[in-house]
Image: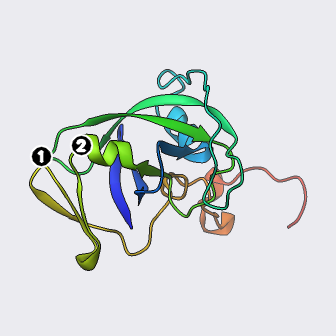
Amino acid sequence: MALSTKMGRLKASFAVDTGAAVNVLSEKAYLALKRASRGSQWPLRPNDLNLMGVTSEPLNILGIVRLPISLVKGTSIMRLDLYVASNFSLPTDGLLGLKSLKSNRMVIHPDINMIKFQGKGFQAMNQPMRLTSECGLNRKVNLGTLPAKLRPYLPFRM
């Protein structure tokens, strides 16, 4: 189950993982967030935990960042600590662990694919989208469709 959220000013998807002790954020999502803030926000703090992923492989933790996460307008912003992992392999930007789910009193309804938070129901995403995809980092551009003055100079033929 994955939720669409806002992380700062950007959209992100988070898997809901009751088996995870902590929250995790992919390095790609973290770097996209840093670029969006022009690098001036969201410093990493040192990490003192060794974490295992779903496949029992150790996660390569780069540090911890505290981020404002919200589900939609009208709900309060959660300030969550996220462990930034360079080898995060889920099809989401990160995951919300049990501690955050409990402390924010989120109620999971797997039978209807929904989470309740602050009295409102939030439908889980059918297909999680990574933040890095939305920011255009994975987007391919057909240079032939650009006006000539916007095309980059290429000294060779393609």
Q: Residue 96 or 146: which is nearer the viewer? A: 96
Residue at label 2? 104
**Side of 137 where 14 appears, left or right:** left
Outermost residue on the left side: it is 119
The residue located at (42%, 55%) in the rendering is: 14
Q: First in sequence, mark 1 or 2: give its number.
A: 1
Indicate whether 6 appears above or below 39: below
Provide the secondary structure element on which disc 2 rests: loop
Q: How many marks?
A: 2
- At 38% from the left and 49% from the top, the residue drawn is 98
Assign a secondary structure to mark 1. Answer: loop
| Residue at the spot 45% in from the left edge and 66% down from the top edge | 128
Q: Is residue 66 left or right of residue 38?
A: left
Residue 1 appears in the picture as rendered: yes
Where residue 19 sits in the image (x, y, percent)? 46, 56
Residue at numbered disc 1: 74
- Tell me residue 10's x, y (percent): 39, 45
Q: CA distance from mark 1 to mark 2?
A: 15 Å
Query: Residue 156: which quarter of the image?
Result: bottom right
Dot 1 crowding, Cα within 10 Å, few <14, some 14–19, many 20+ = few
Q: 131 and 150: which one is in front? A: 131
Residue 10 visible (yes or no):
no
